Image (spheres, helix red, strand yellow):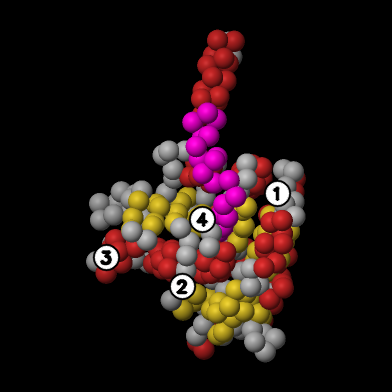
Amino acid sequence: MKKRDMNRNWIATARTLSEALPYLQRYTGAIVVIKLGGHAMGSDEAMETFARDVVLMQQVGVNPVIVHGGGPMINEMLKKLDIQSEFVNGKRVTDEATMEVVEMVLSGRVNKRIVQAINAQGGKAVGLSGKDANLIICDPADPKLGLVGEPTEIKPQFLHTLFNDDAIPVIAPLGAGRNGETYNINGDTAAGAIAAALKADRLLLLTDIDGVRDASGEVVTELTADQIRAMTRDGIIAGGMIPKTETALAAIEGGVRAVVILDGRAPNATLLELYTEHGAGSLIRAR
């Protein structure tokens, strides 16, 4: 590359940093909950990029919280162990044998992979599940689903302790029952409940789609809660997008300032959303 071209690249980088200043100031001290979906984890390279972005966010004053899924990894392990798994309305029926696998994969393989990636970038990630410090207390979501829980009580005090120690919580979506049970929780649901309990400034739902699409198939960059409800009634929002928008609405009603549904496979998706005028994905506000 010629020196002149290199100078242009550095100038462009400097301009980008300069334009990001208002957003850096805007999010100083903010709590941002990031739901990292199993499909969005991708390759080791993608995980490294995500981890670097999270560490950068913390370095400029954000308190990030990572809540992760792991559906593809759970499916892979169940298949290896020849355990059949069924779904009802998009949620995994979880018996005791399946629960053992779910906890092993989420709290073990998936959680520690994310923790290790963040720590390798200079962060101080702490891996835990909703069972730790009674962070998430659950009741059964539906008898048909078995050990699938619905968060009914969130105790976020321990997360504030981690913030004060400059640590980054990485949370597996498992919860504790009132009689010692372990519950499997939908990852989006867990992230929304935690974000509401923390009164987070942002909940970012990183998935394998680039946002909410309108009737013509175009991504809608900003929506209100009323628009979401209308699009759902009209069948425009359907299928797997419904649980995500329901999570968004519940989080906003619980006190989260805004929710963004965005493609976690896109490089630097979180930074683009928080620190650029353009943003990324679909931003949902109360009004």
Foreground: disc 1 or disc 4 = 4
Helix, strand, or loop for circle 3?
A: helix
Q: Which residue is mark 4?
A: 201
Helix, strand, or loop for circle 1?
A: helix
Q: Which residue is mark 2?
A: 90
- On screen, residue 223 above or below 137: above
Q: Earlier in the sequence, mark 3 or mark 1?
A: 1
Q: Earlier in the sequence, mark 2 or mark 3?
A: 2
> Which residue appears at 44% of the width and 56% of the height?
258
Q: CA distance from mark 3 to mark 1?
A: 39 Å
Helix, strand, or loop for circle 4?
A: loop
What amino acid is found at the position of numbered circle 3 in the picture? Answer: Ala
| Mark drawn on residue 118 | 1
What amino acid is found at the position of numbered circle 1 in the picture? Answer: Ile
- On screen, residue 195 above or below 87: above
> Which residue appears at 53% of the width and 16% of the height?
8
Foreground: disc 1 or disc 2 = 1
Residue 159 placement: quadrant = bottom right
Q: Which residues are magenta?
A: 17-38
Crowd tier of the residue under label 1, counting other residues whose Cα lies within 10 Å: few below 14, some 14–19, many 20 or above: many
Helix, strand, or loop for circle 2?
A: loop
Where residue 49 appears, as percent x and y from the top left, is 62, 42
Crowd tier of the residue under label 3, counting other residues whose Cα lies within 10 Å: few below 14, some 14–19, many 20 or above: few
Foreground: disc 4 or disc 2 = 4
